[in-house]
């Protein structure tokens, strides 16, 4: 699946969490250990200057992938490579600062991700100090002011606190903070989900302009397909910790192949079908502690067969799309 000379490559990445009850409870109540497979052997690649969007219902593992890529979580299996260098070994080496400068993250909630006791200058400039990029106080202040103006805020805002800004302005501060170390890869974990629609458009336009100006590479995580269609070049669809389809944006929205992708797109309201009832995503997500055998989507899939219930599908390449589905492979869809 990985493209030649990809900027970022993720290979068979997995993350398992131990969610077992305390030892004493397990002994007294004879309960077994419980392991949650939040991310289950996913692989993908992103080319320099491109945006890959990950979509899926809540709890499918998107945010866990984001934290794995930037080193907030240690992977249980697999690896992440940034221009050929293994990320997690690079973050543990003596030269870890160089790797950390290249990868930054924009978090989902602009109200929770900014320290309310710090002024904007300290919030944005923290990375400059920690990384030792700037030592001169005057240059430090100038860099922070330039970052603020880059995201559409005023240089005079450096003395303010987060509570003095709206949600959209706070998210601009988060973007400025992420840009402080001049990274070339940004992980955006639903950066507009907590914002009004009009403010979402402003933030997304800023991010697209910055990508064009600085050659940034994005992993963009969202559950909003309209936003994904606007910002992405390629789209990966996740379900219960697994990738089920990866395709170029236009191909995926115009000709979705996996039944789950079709259900997600059918649930989106469309102007030409105004007044008609929408088709909701059928069924409920299974318990992730006890996932279905075979294809994890088969309990909700209208095309499921006995093979789907017993055998996990591998990715096949069909019409410029990677899809993991027995029904597609067998020509039943």
Image (tube, rainbow, N blue to C red):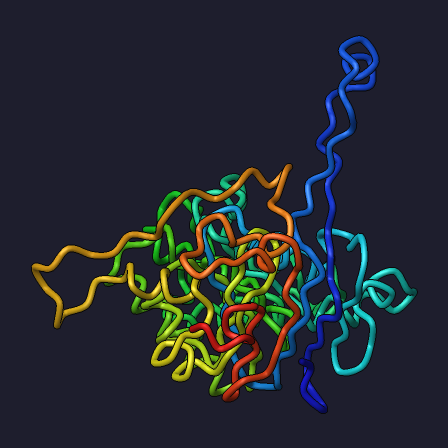
Outermost residue to the right: 94
Q: Residue at x 32, y 51 (%)?
A: 166
Residue 118 to residue 41: above or below? above
Q: Quadrant of the N terminus?
A: bottom right
Residue at the bottom extreme of this rendering: 4
The image quadrant that residue 14 belongs to is bottom right
The image position of residue 121, as x and y in percent, is: 53, 57
Q: As rendered, which of 102 and 120 lies closer to the eye?
A: 102
Q: Quadrant of the C terminus?
A: bottom left
Residue 181 visible to the viewer: yes
- Total numbered labels placed on residues in the image: 0
Q: Is residue 97 left or right of residue 270?
A: right
Q: Position of residue 178 (x, y in %)?
A: 57, 65
Image height of 52 relative to 279, above or below: below
Residue at image point 44% right, 61% down: 303
For image coordinates 73% across by 62% down, the residue present is 13
Q: Nearer the viewer, residue 179 or 280?
A: 280
**Is 288 on the left-hand or right-hand side of 8?**
left
Classify residue 36 as left or right of residue 94. left
* Closer to us: 42 or 192: 42
Looking at this view, name the residue that lies furthest to the top: 28
Position above or below: 43 against 304: below
Q: Position of residue 47 (x, y in %)?
A: 61, 85
Give the image location of residue 328, x and y in percent: 50, 74
Residue occupying image coordinates x 75% and y 82%: 83
Hey, which quadrant is residue 130 in on the image? bottom right
Can the viewer see residue 182?
Answer: no
Residue furthest toward the left? 275
Please identify the quarter of the rendering in which residue 143 is found. bottom right
């Amino acid at each position: 699946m990985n493209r030649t000379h990809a900027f970022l490559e993720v290979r068979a990445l997995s993350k398992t969490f131990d969610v077992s009850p305390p030892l004493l409870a397990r002994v007294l109540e004879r309960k077994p250990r419980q392991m949650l497979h939040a991310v289950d052997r996913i692989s993908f690649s992103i080319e320099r200057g491109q945006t890959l969007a990950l979509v899926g219902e809540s709890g499918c593992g998107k945010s866990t992938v984001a934290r794995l890529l930037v080193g907030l979580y240690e992977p249980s299996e697999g690896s992440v490579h940034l221009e050929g260098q293994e990320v997690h070994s690079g973050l543990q080496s003596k030269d870890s600062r160089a790797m950390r400068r290249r990868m930054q993250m924009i978090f989902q909630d602009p109200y929770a991700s900014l320290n309310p006791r710090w002024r904007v200058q300290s919030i944005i400039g923290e990375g400059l100090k920690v990384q030792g990029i700037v030592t001169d106080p005057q240059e430090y202040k100038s860099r922070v002011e330039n970052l603020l103006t880059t995201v559409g805020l005023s240089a005079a805002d450096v003395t303010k606190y987060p509570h003095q800004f709206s949600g959209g302005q706070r998210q601009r501060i988060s973007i400025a903070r992420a840009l402080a170390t001049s990274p070339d890869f940004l992980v955006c974990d639903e950066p507009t989900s907590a914002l009004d629609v009009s403010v979402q458009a402003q933030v997304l336009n800023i991010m697209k302009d910055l990508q064009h100006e600085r050659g940034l590479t994005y992993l963009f995580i969202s559950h909003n397909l309209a936003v994904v269609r606007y910002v992405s070049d390629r789209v990966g669809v996740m379900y219960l910790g697994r990738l089920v389809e990866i395709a170029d944006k236009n191909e995926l929205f115009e000709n979705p192949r996996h039944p789950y992708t079709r259900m997600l797109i059918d649930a989106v309201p469309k102007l030409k079908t105004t007044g008609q009832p929408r088709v909701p995503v059928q069924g409920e997500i299974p318990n992730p502690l006890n996932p279905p055998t075979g294809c994890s989507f088969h309990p909700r899939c209208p095309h499921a067969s006995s093979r789907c219930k017993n055998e996990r599908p591998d990715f096949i390449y069909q019409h410029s799309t990677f899809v993991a589905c027995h029904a597609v492979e067998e020509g039943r869809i």
